[in-house]
């Protein structure tokens, strides 16, 4: 493997913390308001998809059509509910192994960044007590292109002053793995190996990895 890892970049949702459940609750609430039900199975179609496209899919599921103005208002309501949910989050919602692995990287002087499409990333980090943990935070307020475009990860590498080929990306979505590959980085899928099979390596979660293992894997 030609990747010598000198820095790590983490997606937020599904890797460090699980906020997908709050998106689901907010979308389900919107669907209910529009007069139809929205299931967890339906929600699978929204993973890694932009807010606008998510709303379009939701409306397709319900057979509902809205004007552009109504769509804008609906998306804003959904986001407001989501923000209310995440404002109740705390440190206990960190996924198993996340804090221990970040501490291990820090102890080995490996810088790490957050690379998330979420515009609420800093708000979430504040709630879970990791606001100052990352060497760089690249979120939806800093990038204009969604994954699988590699912009978010390339910007993270640039802010840490580490070449892309020396970065490892941790992602739980296919679009994120694709973005990491396009950036020329070592990609680690976090979750289901059948879905994330394009990644260089797939792990069930950060609780199952150590820095020494990663360094060994990419030596």
Image (cartoon, rainbow, N blue to C red):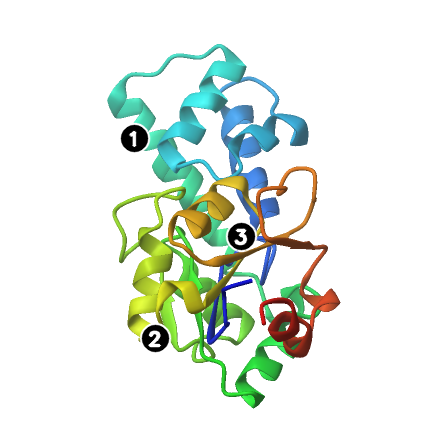
The crowd level at tag 3 (other Cα within 10 Å; few <14, some 14-19, many 20+) is: some
Please determine whether, in this image, residue 82 is positioned above or below residue 164.
above
Give the residue number, with chain letter if any, for mark 1: 72
- 201, 112: nearer the viewer: 201
Residue at image coords 49%, 23%: 58
Q: Position of residue 201 (x, y in %)?
A: 64, 55
Residue 89 seen in render: yes
Q: Could you say where residue 178 lies in the image, as x and y percent from the top left?
A: 46, 43
Which residue is located at x 31 percent, y 75 percent?
Answer: 161
- Residue picked out by circle 3: 85
Helix, strand, or loop for circle 1?
helix
Would residue 150 appear left or right of 169 to someone viewing this image?
A: left
Task: Tell me the tag on residue 160.
Answer: 2
Q: Provide residue 74's location: percent of width, then percent of height.
A: 37, 30
Query: Closer to the observer: label 1 or label 2?
Result: 2
Q: Of the residues under marks 1 and 3, which one precedes in the sequence?
A: 1
Task: Decide if residue 60 is on the left or right side of residue 158.
Answer: right
**Residue 77 versus residue 200: which sits nearer the camera?**
200
Q: Earlier in the sequence, mark 1 or mark 2?
A: 1
SS for tag 3? helix
């Amino acid at each position: 493997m030609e990747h010598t890892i000198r820095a790590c970049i983490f997606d937020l949702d599904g890797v460090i913390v699980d906020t997908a459940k709050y998106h689901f609750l907010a979308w389900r609430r919107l669907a209910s308001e529009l007069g139809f039900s929205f299931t967890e199975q339906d929600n699978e179609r929204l993973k890694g998809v932009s807010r606008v496209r998510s709303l379009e899919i939701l409306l397709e599921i319900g057979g509902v059509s809205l004007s552009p103005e109504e769509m804008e208002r609906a998306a804003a309501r959904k986001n407001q509910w989501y923000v209310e949910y995440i404002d109740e989050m705390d440190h206990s919602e960190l996924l198993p192994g996340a804090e221990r692995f970040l501490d291990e990287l820090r102890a080995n002087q490996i810088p790490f960044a957050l690379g998330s499409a979420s515009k609420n990333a800093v708000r979430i980090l504040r709630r879970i007590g990791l606001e100052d943990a990352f060497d760089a935070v690249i979120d939806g307020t800093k990038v204009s292109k969604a994954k699988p475009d590699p912009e978010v990860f390339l910007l993270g590498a640039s802010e840490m002053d580490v070449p892309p080929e020396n970065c490892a990306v941790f992602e739980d979505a296919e679009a994120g793995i694709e973005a990491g590959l396009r950036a020329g980085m070592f990609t680690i899928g976090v979750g289901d190996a059948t879905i994330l099979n394009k990644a260089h390596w797939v792990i069930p979660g950060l609780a199952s990895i150590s820095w020494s293992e990663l360094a060994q894997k990419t030596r």
